[in-house]
């Protein structure tokens, strides 16, 4: 699937320089950055889900430890 990504001049130049430094295309560099972003946020979402599920069980003990 294709999409258009609009960048300001400074970001475009930084992306161009980074891609050139790594010997990759700008498209490949952006695709990898988006993949990393999605993985990082999926992991954070999973951690939030686990904490929401299990923290209430220890709420009283954590409150006492904080005093």
Image (cartoon, rainbow, N blue to C red):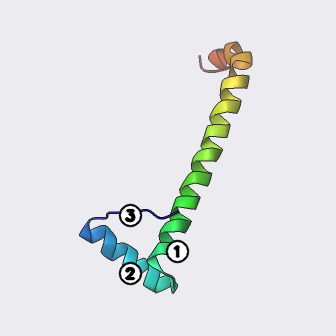
Name the quadrant of the C terminus.
top right
Q: Is residue 60 above or below residue 30?
A: above
In percent of width and height, residue 18 lies at: 43, 78
Residue at which label 1 appears: 28
In percent of width and height, residue 43 lies at: 65, 46
| Extreme residue toward the left, this view | 9
Which SS class for mark 2? helix
Where, by quadrant of the figure, is residue 48 drawn?
A: top right
**Nearer the camera: disc 3 or disc 1:** 3
Q: In the image, what residue occupies the spot 37% across and 63% down?
A: 5
Q: Nearer the viewer, residue 52 or 20?
A: 20
For disc 3, the neighbor class at 10 Å (few under 14, some 14 to 19, many from 20) is: few
Please state if 62 lies on the left or on the right of 14 as rendered.
right
Please state if 23 lies on the left or on the right of 56 as rendered.
left
- Count every numbered label the image shows and give the total: 3
Residue at which label 2 appears: 17
Residue at mark 3 to residue at mark 2: CA–CA distance: 20 Å
Which SS class for mark 1? helix
In percent of width and height, residue 21 lies at: 46, 85
Residue at which label 3 appears: 4
**Nearer the camera: disc 3 or disc 2:** 3
Question: In the rendered structure, are the residues bearing label 3 and label 1 in contact, judged by CB atoms less than 8 Å apart?
Answer: no
For disc 2, the neighbor class at 10 Å (few under 14, some 14 to 19, many from 20) is: few
Q: Nearer the viewer, residue 64 or 34?
A: 34
Please state if 54 lies on the left or on the right of 45 as rendered.
right
Q: Is residue 26 above or below residue 3?
A: below
In percent of width and height, residue 36 lies at: 57, 59
């Amino acid at each position: 699937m294709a999409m258009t990504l609009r960048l300001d001049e400074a970001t475009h130049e930084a992306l161009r320089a980074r891609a050139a430094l790594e010997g990759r295309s700008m498209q490949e560099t952006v695709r990898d950055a988006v993949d990393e972003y999605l993985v990082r946020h999926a992991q954070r979402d999973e951690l939030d889900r686990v904490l929401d599920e299990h923290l209430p069980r220890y709420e009283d003990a954590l409150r006492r430890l904080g005093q």
